[in-house]
Image (cartoon, rainbow, N blue to C red):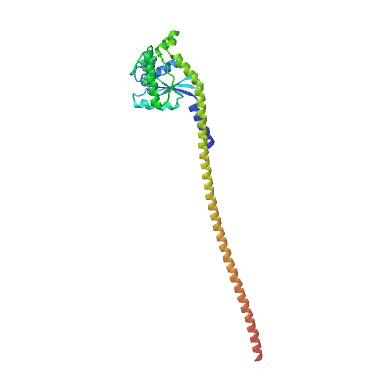
């Protein structure tokens, strides 16, 4: 029999491993600054960033206790990159969709408020049409500005980089995502419990069937022995009956012989 307790403990360990941490995953087309934004959040160059197709494998970095930033390949360049990126999305507590203002049908600079609003609406509409969600937060972020502000200690540049808003927003959601993970963890453990219960019930049915089959075979064997014994006893009884009737016949013959002898003695006396 399988060690169901060990199997269940192993499953719980796997679930804990998978859903303990919060995963903030980026997404967006190739070369739109996905890796750069996460590097800015990390305040180091952890993910490669370059002006060509760069990220081809998903990679993650610890941002803070129990919170990972997951960098993904750009979409719509190579199928292999799309597949790699899509594999990471299901583990996301949140997806940070990155779009660069320098390209696309409505490209703009960060000061062009009117065009920025149109780009934001267009992106949110596309997301709604493709993914079905709405009311997502949007942020206008400049990595060069943030890094210059940070490295040269220029508060104005830092404030204008938009990075603080993005960081604060993500930070403010962490507790909620951890709570969300806890619910996911409990739901998955509950499912595992149900699955285990089903397996145990199946195991019990199998054992009961095996025992029934064994009991059936034992009874059949017992019946064969009883029948054999009954046959032997029957034969014995027949033999006893036979002996009885032979003994009766013998005593009858003896009786007749005695009568004949007596008659013979009498007849002999007459002569
Ligand atoms: N002007 C400007 N350039 C940026 C910004 N962020 C990133 N870049 C530049 O854009 C280019 C691509 O940046 P990456 O971070 O590598 O982009 P990516 O989306 O990760 O690209 P892939 O991994 O190839 O999908 C690099 O040359 C960056 O320096 C930004 O906020 N403003
Ligand atoms: Mg990248």
Left or right of 63? Residue 81 is left
What residue is shown at x 46% (from left), y 21% (from top)?
68
Q: Position of residue 213 (x, y in %)?
A: 52, 50
What residue is shown at x 66% (from left), y 88% (from top)?
266
What residue is shown at x 37% (from left), y 14% (from top)?
114
Left or right of 216? Residue 124 is left
Q: Position of residue 136 (x, y in %)?
A: 43, 21
Q: Position of residue 79 (x, y in %)?
A: 34, 27
Left or right of 217? Residue 109 is left
The foreground one among 207 and 184 is 184
Question: In this figure, what is the number of numbered marks?
Answer: 0
What residue is shown at x 57% (from left), y 63% (from top)?
232
Residue 163 in view, yes or no: yes
Above or below 223: residue 64:
above
Residue 153 in view, yes or no: no
The foreground one among 175 and 223 is 175
Query: Going by the picture, which residue comes out furthest to the bottom?
Result: 271
Above or below 91: residue 262:
below
Q: Position of residue 6 (x, y in %)?
A: 53, 34
The quarter of the image holding the C terminus is bottom right
The foreground one among 10 and 127 is 127
The foreground one among 73 and 95 is 95
């Amino acid at each position: 029999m399988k060690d169901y307790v060990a199997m269940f403990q192993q499953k719980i360990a796997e679930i804990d491993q998978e859903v303990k941490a919060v995963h903030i995953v980026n997404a967006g087309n190739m070369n739109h600054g996905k890796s750069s934004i996460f590097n800015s959040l990390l305040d180091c160059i952890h993910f490669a960033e370059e002006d060509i197709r760069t990220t081809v494998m998903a990679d993650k970095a610890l941002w803070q206790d129990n919170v990972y930033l997951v960098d993904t390949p750009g979409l719509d360049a190579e199928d292999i990159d799309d597949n790699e990126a899509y594999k990471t999305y299901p583990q996301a507590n949140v997806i940070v969709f990155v779009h660069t203002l320098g390209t696309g049908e409505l490209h703009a600079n960060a000061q062009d408020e009117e065009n920025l609003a149109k780009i934001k609406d267009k992106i949110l509409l596309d997301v709604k049409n493709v993914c079905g969600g709405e009311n997502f937060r949007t942020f206008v972020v400049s990595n060069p500005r943030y890094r210059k502000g940070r490295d040269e200690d220029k508060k104005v540049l830092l404030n204008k980089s938009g990075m603080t808003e993005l960081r604060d927003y993500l930070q403010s959601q962490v507790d909620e995502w951890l709570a969300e993970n806890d619910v996911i963890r409990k739901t998955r453990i509950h499912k595992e419990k149900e699955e285990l219960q089903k397996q145990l019930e199946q195991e019990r049915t199998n054992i009961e069937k095996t025992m029934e089959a064994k009991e059936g075979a034992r009874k059949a064997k017992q019946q064969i022995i009883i029948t054999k014994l009954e046959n032997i006893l029957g034969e014995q009884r027949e033999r006893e009956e036979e002996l009885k009737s032979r003994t009766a016949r013998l005593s009858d013959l003896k009786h007749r012989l005695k009568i004949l002898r007596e008659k013979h003695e009498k007849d002999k006396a007459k002569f």
